[in-house]
Amino acid sequence: MKRMLIIDDEEPSLIITKATLELLGILADCAFDRFEAIKMSREGNYDGYFLDDSVNGDVEGRSLGWAIQERHGERGIPIIWHSGKYRDFYPGPNGGFTGYLCKPWNPEQIEKVLREQNLIK
């Protein structure tokens, strides 16, 4: 079973995302701020990340995405950026991200992006 870390500073979003991932067969852990996210990413063995565009701890999601990608080196890891902002703000692969979802998303959209990232079949 695949395992992902959800990083978001909005508790309702964490709860909904976790429930959706688990319905799709992915084990999900949650981090509420960058400090918790960095600690969990070092300690956990994650197959991917679901990262909000901004998190508590005075950092944009973009910076945290790069920090996570650097830790995984050349092999990289799926990091799905999710945002309530317009897609124009999506930093893409140059920002360390491999996928994008705009809030509010629906279960079909998250399933599609997870398939694109080879996190589900």
Image (spheres, helix red, strand yellow):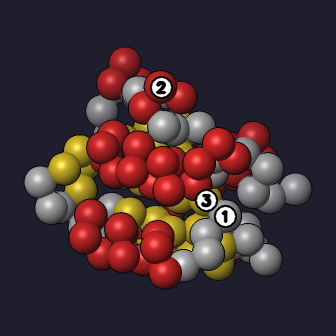
Please indicate whether residue 82 sits to the left or right of residue 57 in the image: right
What is the secondary structure assignment of the residue under circle 1?
loop
Give the distance between the C-alpha atoms of the residues marked 1 and 3, in whole angstroms. Answer: 4 Å
What is the secondary structure assignment of the residue under circle 2?
helix
Assess whether mark 3 and mark 1 are in contact (beta carbons under 8 angstroms).
yes
- For disc 3, the marked residue is 48
- Percent across and percent down for residue 15 are 42, 74
Q: Which residue is at 30% across, 43% downward?
A: 63
**Dot 3 crowding, Cα within 10 Å, few <14, some 14–19, many 20+:** many
Q: Which residue is at 69% across, 47% downward?
A: 75
Assess whether mark 2 and mark 3 are in contact (beta carbons under 8 angstroms).
no
- Percent across and percent down for residue 45 are 62, 75
- Percent across and percent down for residue 26 are 69, 72
- For disc 2, the marked residue is 94
What is the secondary structure assignment of the residue under circle 3?
strand
- Eyeballing the image, is 44 above or below 83? below
Q: Amino acid at mark 3?
A: Gly
